[in-house]
Every structure is written in C-alpha cells, then in structure tokens.
Amino acid sequence: MKAKVVGIGIVVLVIVVGLVQLLRPLPNPQLTLQGAAESVVPGKAQFSFPGEGQSAVAVTGVGLMGATANQTPVPIASLTKMMTAYVVLKHHPLLEGEDGPTLTMTAEDEALYKKDKAAGDSVVKVVAGDKWTERQMLEGLMLPSGDNMAMTLAKWTAGSESAFIKEMNDTAKQLGMNNTTYADVSGVNPASRSTAVDQLKIADAAMQIPAFRDIVKEAQATLPGAGTVYNVDYFVGKNGIVGVKTGSTSQAGGCFVSAMYHNVGGKQVLMLGAVLGQHGGQPLMSALKANLTLLQEAGKYITTSSISKGTTVGSASVPWQSPVPLQTSEDATYIAFPGMTVTRKLVGNNLQVTAGEQKITVPLTQAEQLKKPSLKWRLMRLS
C-alpha cells in the first residue's frame, strides 16, 4: 500500500512539474548587435580659425564640427540681440509673412532713442506716435542693430528690462548655454558674456523660427520714421550668407554669427559659424571674412551616410533555435562629417542610430521567423 501511494505521488509530481514547465513564460528573444556600438566618422576637419579671439562651426541639427580651445566667456556686444529676438518671438510668435500686433511708440521710446544716439550707441530712429508692427520692431532690432529697440521690445514683452533679462538667462540655461550670462538686452553692457560655442546654440534655436530666418536674411527694410535701414551684416545675401548677427564694441571687438545653406545629397543643410573677439585692423570686417571662410571650409566636409535596406545589423536568438539575422526594412540616411560620433543600438524591432545630434530609427525585419519551441524543449528546459 505504501509503495502504491509513493508511486501515485511520483506520477502527480511528474504531472505537476510538466504543467509548470509548460506554463512557464518563454524567454524573450536576445538581440545582438552586429559590429561596433560606437564609431567615429573617419578623417579630421581642418579649419582656418583666426589667430585671435575664439571661433566655432556647427551644422544645425547635426552638431559641432569644430571650435577653438579657448571657450571662455567674453563680451559679445550685439550678438546679445539674438536672444532678445528669440525671447520676444517665444512670447509673440509670428507666422511666416505675418506682421504681428502693432505698438504705438511713446514719448519715452523717442527719448530713449535720442539718449542712446547721444551716447554713440547703435540705434534705430523712433518718433513718438508712429505705429510699428512686431516684425518692424524686430527688423529695427536685428538689421541696424537698434539698442533702443531692444529696450522697447523687452518692456513690451516682459514689463521691465530686469524681468526680460531674467528670462534671457533662464532660456540660456534651457538651451545648454552654460557659459553665457546676459546683463542687458542689447549687449552694450560688457557683462553680457558668452562663448562662440554657446552663441551657435542660440543661433541654432532662433534659426528654427521662420520669422527670425526671414528677418535676418534681409539686406534692408523700410521702417516708420526711420525710412530705409540697412543690415549691419554687409555679407548678407552675398556668397550664400543668410544671417545671422553682427556685434562690435571696444570691449568685445568684432563679432559675427553667420549662417549658410549647403546642399548635401539633395538636402539643404544649414551651417553656422561664430567668430568673437577680433580687435586688429577692421574688427567687424575681420569677423565677417573669417566666418565666410569657415563656412566655405565646412561645406567641403559635410557628406551623407546611408544604411541600405536589407543590411544585416544584428540577430535575434532564442535557446531552441539558431540566431536569426535582423535586417533593415528601409533605407536611412543621415548627415555626417569627420570626427562625428555615431552610436547604434537595437531596441525592439528597430535599429536606433544617433549621429551627432541626429536620431534615426530604422525598422527591422527578421530574415526568417522565430519558431515556437518544441514540446520536448519546453518540458526539458532548465532555465
């Protein structure tokens, strides 16, 4: 009798173990990347950086191509106005071709114009009672680089200069401009300081706004009371330059953040250059010429890199079957330049590629379907 009970117990145990084995969740497929997870685009980009000051070159949405080593904060003069315009447009967005709300200039605005003019600052003429649209105010800010218009815009947007400056600095932090401090809205104050690399960050953000792009590529504009005003950026519209902002004071020297489009594989890519602290000869012209050279050099290094459909990039494996190749199910292309870091990883049914600041997701397909495990494997599995 005892033996019979033991036998029944063993049978029950076997049945229970078998059921447990059959009901256990199957392991997820293990994904294995083929090739290096991180690589660097071969070669080295060589730039003719000026011997003085600091410089940097970047591709919008792609990343920093090169920069001088001395990225320490220095006065940036009217480059400050890029952030001023950016904050205004965040508060008062303009659609492409839209003029925006109208503001009537006050006696205080006119007095500010006369005060700044007497001080020898860069100004745009303002007459009390004249009506300016938002677009015209931004043109007055960015083209003739009106210091007085910077103050008018700041008070209109935030109520006071101090409140506007706080927002400028908060925005700088949000954009990762960790070496930038704004002390005023125009750049007259030498305590408004930044680096070439940081100035490319605000230029990148601002140039993503269509209204900003439209304004900074203008060679001239007609404004109320002021008549025709001209862009201090003498190079705009020439040699492919489409902006962005000049700056020049005795403390800052000649400064320029420039922009130029370059055709890469049928796609228009925006390149940005920054040159700060040019003091010899004609400081501003030196900054303008240096930027043109940097952007022309950058264009020679920018290429495209492709991942073709059907490329095997890894494998999926399960314990009961040989690994199955994972292949891209569509073509993918990204912008590349020498020295750029490219990382790859498998996530679910996708290959995720990070190329500089670009993030590309490429769908994957299995070369063959993963099979279900056999009954024998499921009963005999140990893990």
Image (cartoon, rainbow, N blue to C red):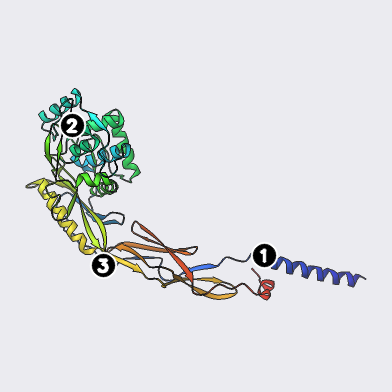
SS at badge 1: loop
User: Residue 145: where, in percent of width, then height?
Assistant: 16, 38
Indicate which label's residue lies in the foreground, 2 or 3: 2
Q: Residues within 10 Å of mark 2 (few under 14, many from 20)?
A: many
Q: Which mark is residue 255?
A: none
Residue pushed farthest left?
Answer: 281
- Nearest to the observer: residue 229 or residue 361: 229
Name the front one of labels 3 and 1: 1
Seen as rendered, the residue at the extreme top is 107
For residue 24, the mark is 1
Q: Relative to the observer, which residue lies in front, 5 or 357? A: 357
The residue pinned by badge 3 equals: 43
User: Distance from label 2 to label 3 (Cα)?
Assistant: 47 Å
Residue 122 appears left or right of 337 = left
Residue at 11% across, 47% down? 234
> Which kind of residue does numbered mark 3 sit on?
Gly
Query: What residue is pinned by disc 2?
Result: 148
